[in-house]
Amino acid sequence: MNQNLLIVDDEAEILSWLAELFKYEFTLEAGNGCRHEYTAGGHDGSEVRKTENEYTDECDRELGVYTANSAMEAVRLLAKIRFDVVLTDIRMPGMDGITLFRHIKENWPRCKTVFLTGYRNFEDVYQIINHGDVKYILKSEDDAVIMDAVRDFLLMSRQELEREMQQKEQERWLNEAKYWLKQDFMNQLCAGSLPHNPNERMQSLGIPLDAGKEVLPFFLRIEKDWKEQERESLFQEEALITILQENVPLKLKFYVHILGGSQELLLVQPIEEMADWQMVAVISQGAVEYAQERFRNLYNATVSAVAASEPVLFADIAVCLRRMKQYMFGYMGGAREAILRLDAVAPESEERACQDYFTWMVSLRNLLETRKQQDYFALLRKCLREMAGKSSSHDTIALEIYYSISVLLLQFINENHLNEQIAFQLGIYKLTRVEEHESWAQAAEYLTEVSEAIFSLLETNENNLANHALGRVVDYIEKHLDEELSLTMLADVGGFNASYLSRLFRQMQNETISDFILHKRIELAKDMLANSNEKIQKIAARTGYLSPHSFTRAFRNEVGISPTEYREMKMGERSSFGQPM
């Protein structure tokens, strides 16, 4: 997390003094002797290494130091930049510090405020004393006291945010994990595999059904124009669940499982007091009819359904679902907003392995898009094992798996403009010609090779994009060393957010942005000192420092000697080699 400090004072000398104090002398210390330093030059920010009471992994941070010579100027900056701490005078012409503080709390409630004043004024103190994120310090205090106040607030701000982020991340992870665990449980159920201790699993996942009792299934299909098939598909699936929740009466327990492809499975059970399954079927069908009408009015799309003719055991849900799908797609055709009962004589097609290949393809697509390479290949191998085990070249299941994966890969190649690059590595025409392979095992090997080529190209393209963006940042820095180089502004140049740019720069350049800027400025200063007669004041301005004093301090810290001593040393070297001085 990168942090920003805003210093506000209407007196130019005090503003300059505070800016230099926090740019060149400010350090952050933590427990166990671990020292963290802000080593900024100009307005480019600084590095922080995170440690709290123990040594931890290095975490580079940037501190942006900004100044404002009035409260109104501070308000303008606050409208553009997020600040973690504001160090401000209280008594200023126009808007005073207390009014500025109120503006800060209205717009940036996380921001901490350190009031700095030249004299004691208890009336001011009383106005702010009840705020826990406020400090009141006299300007007559030592520099260390002022820096300690800011240091404490920077650490407090970071720790508060990190705790909240950890809590939210944990909640998000738990909710996401619970969602996918539900999906996995139901996918197993729909594939004919009843997990061990199903009631215990369902209770922990929040599925309000009893696996030891019968359930009445409904297969639902959202009907829409093919042009809208992909747009808002998941949104409409979730919306249908919400509408069903509003219309299924309290007499029934139910759960809706998203199958994908605008398809859902509705499972209904009666409460303990209600055992008449005919009544359950009538009430359930009525709820689906209400949902159809509501869905059509809200989304201009219809819902069709196939209802099981009788309740089934949990272990038989997979077989019933397969029959309902066959009835929906084989006999309902284009029927819209229909609810048909699966009768006992509905013909069944030839039995096939009870695997939901469509679900597998959706998962493969998601893993490919999110670049989860290890999980992708684990699932791909599972799919290909089903295909490679077939012996006949006309096996319909093997053909379905091969062309499903082929279409998925072709779509991804086209969407990501990889067709020309991948054509140099292998023949992608085989994706549509299964007869080009001598066996299903060879076909499986080919699909694996195509997948490996895609991931390799993605990694190369991402690295090229990052290198190009960082190249823009480096070029901008080198051409604007005499200007303010804040992390926020450089992030705009690179096209990244500030935090990502900071991490990426360190990863690819092996140093922080602030260190890079410092080194470039010192290199330029060395060249000007050695090869020109420019005054120290001009060299300081040319290299982005606010004053000769700031430049001299930064130069000495980096080189070990002052700029004047360095110039004299270089003059002596030229003299000893007989070069003109």
Image: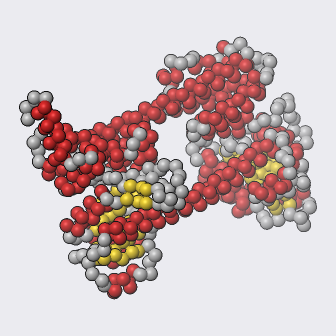
Coordinates of residue 426 in the picture (x, y in percent)? 56, 18
Q: Nearer the viewer, residue 259 or 197?
A: 197
Taking the view exactly as shown, the residue that stands out farthest to the bottom is: 123
Q: Is residue 71 above or below residue 309?
A: below
Q: Is residue 373 visible?
A: yes
In the image, what residue occupies the spot 47% across and 56% down?
A: 34
Coordinates of residue 111 in the picture (x, y in percent)? 41, 67
Q: Nearer the viewer, residue 395 or 537?
A: 537
Instruction: Give the side of residue 408 with respect to residue 525, left or right.
Output: right
Quadrant location of residue 446?
A: top right
Q: Nearer the viewer, residue 74 or 146?
A: 146
Q: Is residue 189 above or below residue 460?
A: below
In the image, what residue occupies the spot 76% across and 44% down?
A: 187
Coordinates of residue 285 in the picture (x, y in percent)? 80, 55
In the image, what residue occupies the spot 61% across and 50% down?
A: 235
Q: Is residue 295 visible?
A: no
Instruction: Give the side of residue 397 with respect to residue 450, left or right.
Output: right
